Image: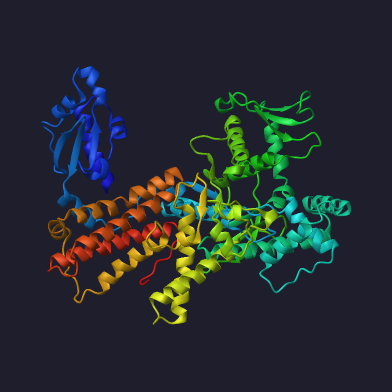
Amino acid sequence: MLQKYKNHFAEIMRQKTNLSFDEVFALMETPPENIWGDFAFPCFQFSKTLKKAPNTVAQEFVKDLNSKFFTKFEAVGPYVNAYINPELFITDVFLTQDPTPADRENQDTKVLIEYMSANPNKPLHIGQARNICIGDSIRKVFHYLWYQTHASNYGDDSWVNVGYNIVGHLHYGLPIETDKKFDHYCGEIYTQMREKDEDPQFKKLLSETLRKIEDGKDPDVYRIHQEYTKRCALEQIKTCRRMNASFDMINWETDILHMKFFAEAIELLKEKWYVKYVDEGEATGCRIIDLSTLPEYEKEEKKYQILIKSDWVATYTAKDIAFALWKLGYLTKDFLYKSFTHEANGNIIYTTTGEATGEIKEKFWNYNIAVTVIDNRQLHPQEVVKSSLKLLGYLNKNKEYTPLGYGVVYLTPKTLLSFWYQLTEEEKLEKRLPFASRKGWTVTIDEMLHMIHEKAYRETKERNPEKDAERLDDVSEKIAIGSLRFFLIKSDISKDIVFDVDEALDMQWESWAYILYTWARIQSLIDNNPEPIQNLSPEEIAKLLTEPEEFALIKKIAERNEIILTTQQQLAPHIICRYLLDISKLVNSYYANIKILKSEDPLKSSRISLLQKTLERMKTAMELIGMSFLERM
């Protein structure tokens, strides 16, 4: 809605200047705190051609400006500022029935979001939770905008980490069955087997087992590997499900190998002269891709990437290029699939399979947009994949490949201490501490959610002693999930963050608890109104809502569609978090300064209608970042 008025102002200024609409639009600004209007257009660049000061240019521009969409235009220094017509704007907002902010032209565009991508041999930790929350939020946004959207978990089941577990069960007598949550049990086995890293016999067994996993021909190794990785992944999916995150499929690396995707990809790459065999230098005997012609490699010392090493073993970059070619539809065949598990809503999560009993799912192939959510520390190889695809001519206006890096999650010493980890006095004084598996500092998502749940339960019970245990448990679970998800994505995702459990639950801080508190306050106001509200027309409401606090709140809720589009374009879910925090602050300011239930009708009804519209807009934004809302705190 705000975009509509911004477009009108841009068109007005286009007619006053020799600039195009797009040029005018790009120059437009929002005045600080909206003190001097709603939109501002700078006049600096006209000073030289008109031989007048920017302030004078602005004064001349505003002389004959007029529009029904704006109450006035004024020169504020070197800017032309426009003031939205509040009555017309409010009418427009209340006439709009919460539309989807895009038509269905996107429904022919296929999008694949790959996230989590965890080794299927241990529980998910708090660092991976950020990956999941980012990927799942982006998936929800694309889906909301009518894109054909699928979510993929890349199961790295041929990597050395899985080998540790398989060796432990096959050769060291460790039982597979357990009463523990299976992924947590896998983590214990992995830690136990890592202690044998220096044992020559173990190294030999590990090397042999990894080869057997890759070729898939040893029946005993194949059987235990399939059962083990699938059971562990199922438990990891359960953890994701608890966080309101889900997938459409799991793509297993061993299936990429067994389906010969890499072999086909290499044949494609050999046809391009950028892929070369090297017979001198440090890459002698290797097959490389030459990236030297790309601008981004102009200043790089190493202008190539090894695809196949001298021992004819493919590098991970080469495997990732093969997988990317599958995503974008450049390989001649697809995986086979079978049902892996069902979600509560009936959706099926599929798993790839190399078995002949699998199905072909054409919808899981030939994507137009592929986004890979990846830890910043692992971003470079994915950037190489993108550069290689661009160099080889596989990227164009209909085929996009985007590695999306995110910052590392650190923990405060206080949070680590709450999990009973031992810290030195020096460590206790640090502002943040990294994960350190050698010290045992690995906090799982399950453990973190349990701790936040328990803390939320105690605090909720203290505030609501009359509530029964079932109600308290439900409220605490929603607070725990929302608090963790919100904290992990509320900041610029490219930046590192420091997680603190107390900060995540602080209702005075920029937290999910603060937003839930605001939601519950609005709901309580609506419910406590003793009489039904009057059925007022949008025009009637617009004439009644004249307070500055009301117009500020209405403008903010009207931004929702633009906020969602910006989130999709920038792949930045923190924008929605910021939007919800801004609305919450405006609502609480409105509550503090304006009499709502004590005002007389029809004014009271118009104010309650505004609160209902606010909840409507908040609900959509909350759902897009995977949050559950509460009627009461």
Q: Nearer the viewer, residue 99 or 307?
A: 307
- Residue 383 picture quarter: top right
Residue 345 visible in image: no
Instruction: Count all numbered tags in the image, as a single digit.
Output: 0
Tell me which corner region of the image, top left, top right, bottom left or bottom right, holds residue 262: top right
Is residue 83 something one can see in this rendering? yes
Coloring basis for residues: rainbow
Given the current orientation, which residue lies at the most extreme front position?
A: 425
Task: Give the quadrant of residue 349.
Answer: bottom right
**Residue sitting at x 45%, y 59%:** 503
In x, y percent, where is residue 226? 74, 61
215 on left or right of 528: right
* x then y, percent, for residue 57: 18, 25
Q: Quadrant of the C terminus?
A: bottom left
> Which residue appears farthest toward the right when viewing the image?
201
Q: Position of residue 461 (x, y in %)?
A: 43, 76
Image coordinates of residue 606 in percent, x first then y, are: 18, 63
Q: Nearer the viewer, residue 618 or 336?
A: 618
Q: Nearer the viewer, residue 133 or 591?
A: 591
